[in-house]
Amino acid sequence: MPKVTRPKFPKGYVDHPTSEVSWEHVEKRLSDSLNYWLCSVYPEGRPHVVPRWGAWLDGCLYYDGSAETRHARNLVKNPHVTLHLESGNDVVILEGISKPVSRPDPAFARRLSQIYRKKYESEGYAPKPTQWDDGGLYAFTPRQCLAWTRFFENPTKFIF
């Protein structure tokens, strides 16, 4: 379980929070989300944001794609990324590291494939467990997370 604390805001933003967001709520949002916004950084420092499909599994977001995509090429120089879910009201913002994953073991690949199929088959994407045998799989590992459902009441920071 991550350590729970409060984010630091300037005076007058959230001076008297009354509750916290539970990690269980955040994990459910991460598991249920269809779209994840991933921000990487160009080698010269400009941000690059792209929506990704993915699967939250064992404390990481797994997503796939070609090593030739802009975000994958950015990761070679700088693996630090920010990940954001789509809601501006039920907020989940994570910072961490994203790296390519080597060939996943068959049991893990089956679990990952099942999650992808359940979430994205209706969109036309249903990878088989062998999809990532030759690469193309990435893992985002969080370092910290900011979350809130009511900004003035429950901004919460999780540290891993």
Image: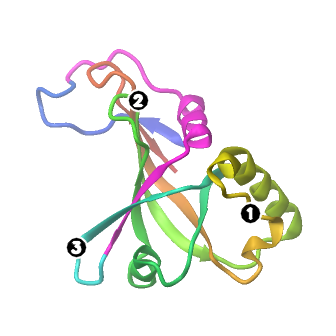
**Percent from the top left, x then y, of residue 22?**
53, 27
Write down the quadrant of residue 113 in the picture: bottom right
111 relative to 79 in the view: left or right: right
Q: Which amino acid type is shown beneath numbered disc 2? A: Asp
Secondary structure beneath label 2: loop
**Percent from the top left, x then y, of residue 125?**
67, 58
Task: Identify residue for label 3.
Answer: 46
Task: Identify residue for label 1.
Answer: 127
Which numbered circle lies on residue 79? none
Which numbered circle lies on residue 90? 2
Marks 1/3: CA–CA distance: 32 Å
Q: Are marks 3 and 2 in contact (CB under 8 Å)?
A: no
Look at the image and tell me whether residue 1 can be seen.
no
Secondary structure beneath label 3: loop
Which tag, 1 or 2, sits closer to the chain's start? 2
Q: What stretch is highlighted in magenta?
A: 15-41
Q: Is residue 21 magenta?
A: yes
Secondary structure beneath label 1: loop
Residue drawn at (39%, 25%), measured in percent from left and top? Answer: 149
Write down the quadrant of residue 66 in the picture: bottom right
Marks 3/2: CA–CA distance: 27 Å
